[in-house]
Image (cartoon, rainbow, N blue to C red):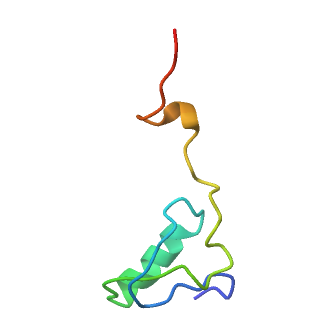
């Protein structure tokens, strides 16, 4: 596991918009984890892969 990432094997919150989410998911699958938590990871607030506001279904656009 990469030292920059720190997924913990426990129930908690995950950041699906983190650029490293896929790597943490791979770790969870390899370890047969039911859950994992991002609370102690330095990337827990990384929203690099969050979609643009205009691309979300809930955005209203006046025309």
Placement of 26 over or under 19, stated as above or below? below
For residue 31, side relative to residue 24 (left or right): left
Residue at image position (56%, 81%) is: 39
In the displayed orientation, state which residue is furthest to the top: 63
Residue at image position (57%, 50%) is: 50
For residue 44, side relative to residue 14 (left or right): right
Placement of 60 over or under 56, stated as above or below? above
Residue at image position (47%, 72%) is: 14
Q: Position of residue 49 (x, y in %)?
A: 58, 53
The quadrant holding residue 26 is bottom left
Residue at image position (58%, 64%) is: 18
- Of 33 and 11, the residue lying toward us: 11
Q: Position of residue 16 (x, y in %)?
A: 48, 63
Q: Position of residue 15 (x, y in %)?
A: 52, 67
Which quarter of the image is occupied by the N terminus?
A: bottom right
- Of 63 and 20, the residue lying toward us: 63
Placement of 63 over or under 59, stated as above or below? above
Count of numbered tags? 0
């Amino acid at each position: 596991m990469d030292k920059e990432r720190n997924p913990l094997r426990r129930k908690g919150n995950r950041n699906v918009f983190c650029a490293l989410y896929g790597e943490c998911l791979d770790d969870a699958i390899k370890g047969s984890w039911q859950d994992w938590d991002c609370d102690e990871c330095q990337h827990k607030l990384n929203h690099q892969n969050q979609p643009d506001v205009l691309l979300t279904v809930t955005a209203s656009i006046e025309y």
